[in-house]
Amino acid sequence: MTASKRKRTAYLFVGPFLALFTVFFLFPLGYELRLSLFRNVMGVNSFAGLSNYRLAFHDAAFWHGMARVGLFGLLQLITVQGLGLVFALLLDGPWIKAKSVFRLIYLLPYAVPGVIAALMWGFLLAPGLDPMLKLLGSVTGGVAPNLLASGFLLYVIVAIVTWEWAGYNMTLYYAGLTALPLEIYEAARLDGCTEFQLALRIKVPMLQTMVGLTVLLSIIGALQLFTEPYILSGITPVSPTYTPNLYAYNMGFNYGNFNYAATLSFILAMITLAATGGFLWLRSQRGRFRAS
Amino acid sequence: MTVTTALQRQQHRSAVGRRGNLAKTVLYTIVLIVGALYFLFPLVWLTVSTTKTSPELFNSSIFSVHGQLWRNFRALFAYQGGIYWRWYLNSILYAGVTASLSTLVSALAGFGLSNYRFGLKRLTQGMILVALLVPGSVLSIPLFLVIRDMDLLNTYPGVILPFIGSAFGVYFMRIYSASAFPQEFLDAGRIDGASDVRIFFQLALPMLLPGLVTLFLLAFVGTWNNFFFALLVLSSRQLYPVTLGLANWAANIANPSAVAPPPYMLLLTGALCSIFPLLILFPWLRRYITAGGLTGGIQL
């Protein structure tokens, strides 16, 4: 077969993906950028230059939302990745019986759609519905605390997301630990390494690619937070600008301003790309530093 | 990486078992039990709640089991001409079709990228990486407009088409194909006179099967849980997936000025039922998704 014929065959394989990717990713990406440079006044589109971006830059609600998902991302890193890692290390150590029971239970929330998880927790915590808060109320003497009040809401969402993903991460980490060669452990033990040192000095570093991958997914997930606050807004008042994604959604679909909504989305995309790209770059730098 | 067998690990465990002392065993077991209660609590509450009537839900203690389960199921079946089951079938359709097609497209492209050189190869791989690093939902506004201009708003293809060309799927299959179907196999097939397309379908696909199953399951779960885009594209209740339908019922749950009280029991029974399909897939999810995590994690 000639080289040019091979190339044609290659496009036969890659073509369907490239076509779909162009129509449903590249084109919308360009379209979003274009939308963000226009303004719609009384149904007439006119070029607006960077004025939407100037507006967004001074839009305090947008940056509050951004700071909120940033904080959310950090907390989630501690609870989802941190707890996942702790659970995996505990299960991998010599202490625990009935490991498979714990592993099964911890992964169960993975079968629950995010919408349903948010609904259940919303139900459990909503004042007025509150089966759980009644319990709390009887402890504190009458008045149940409102955990969905605006000051607490973010932590409730962290708890929901932790419930959804900690077990999944534990499962991945545990599988990673199981794939490590035993010889390393033997050698470490012969050198008098305790279980704790073993976990910290050997198991955690060996898991770092896997942890890195889940952290990356976690950053992306945190910045696009939408489903949980959206669902909870049916149960408790949630600001329409609570997260950048929620803000863009409301701006586009409730206020009909697609141009400004596209601007907010595009900024969010660039910030996410900077965060994830920066994370990957940092990791590669560290790898290079170690190697040299 | 050497993978040790389960038996070896077991022997190893019992050999080191002596090292774990009792106090630690008790402490760590308690920690894990607390974790287990956290993960189980909402699910147990949900299951118990579906055995109650709406007044019982608010006036009985949380974990008292009542006898209304069957009644709630029947009510869910009958409500608004069985709309819930329509949603259920929609969800299965969306998840099944999206997962099948995106797995096929990803396998084709992954195979192509790992076995051929062509002009757009580097560019394609670069774009895939960028797409991986950006959440899909940031494109939902232009994507909505594209779907609208294609006249696909409020149709089945409108929810399915945008998710078939998956950057993650191609990225995953490229890595998987490179390890499970080395280039030499393609060369050998060519020497035997088979066309590349035939080699792909008859030789490569069977060898890529575990990867295909992983990808199918990931896409199935992803679509089953998808909510955001369906919310934008679908306006007719007949086309809703389960997630969107339930969110719709829940929208006014705590609104005291709502005309009728929200259908609490339908909502909770519906929520419980929406978990079943993924629970049925659970044994496969466990096996294949950890395998998928390992493959993806090694490369990135």
Image (tube, coloured by chain):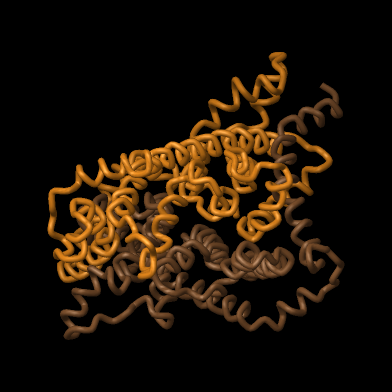
Chain colours: A brown, B orange
Query: How many numbered circles does the render carry?
Result: 0
> In this rendering, is residue B6 above or below A217?
above
Q: Which residue is located at x 81 percent, y 29 percent?
A: A8
Residue, far top: B193
Is there any visible trace of residue A281 in the rendered image? no
Image coordinates of residue A16 in percent, x first then y, are: 71, 35
Position of residue A254 in the picture relative to residue B211 (left or right): right
Judge by depth and name the residue closer to the eye, B280 or B97: B97
Q: Quadrant of residue B130?
A: bottom right
Q: Which residue is located at x 68 percent, y 67 percent?
A: A261
Q: Which residue is located at x 41 percent, y 40 percent?
A: B88
> In this rendering, is residue B285 above or below A209?
above
Image coordinates of residue B298 in percent, x first then y, are: 55, 52
Q: Quadrant of residue A204?
A: bottom left
Image coordinates of residue A240 in percent, x first then y, are: 54, 72
Quarter of the rendering occupied by the C terminus of chain B: bottom right
Judge by depth and name the residue closer to the eye, B69 or A221: B69
Image coordinates of residue A186 in percent, x first then y, are: 35, 57
Residue, far front: B259
Is there any visible trace of residue A236 in the rendered image? yes
Q: Quadrant of residue A164?
A: bottom left
Q: Which residue is located at x 35 percent, y 70 percent?
A: B256
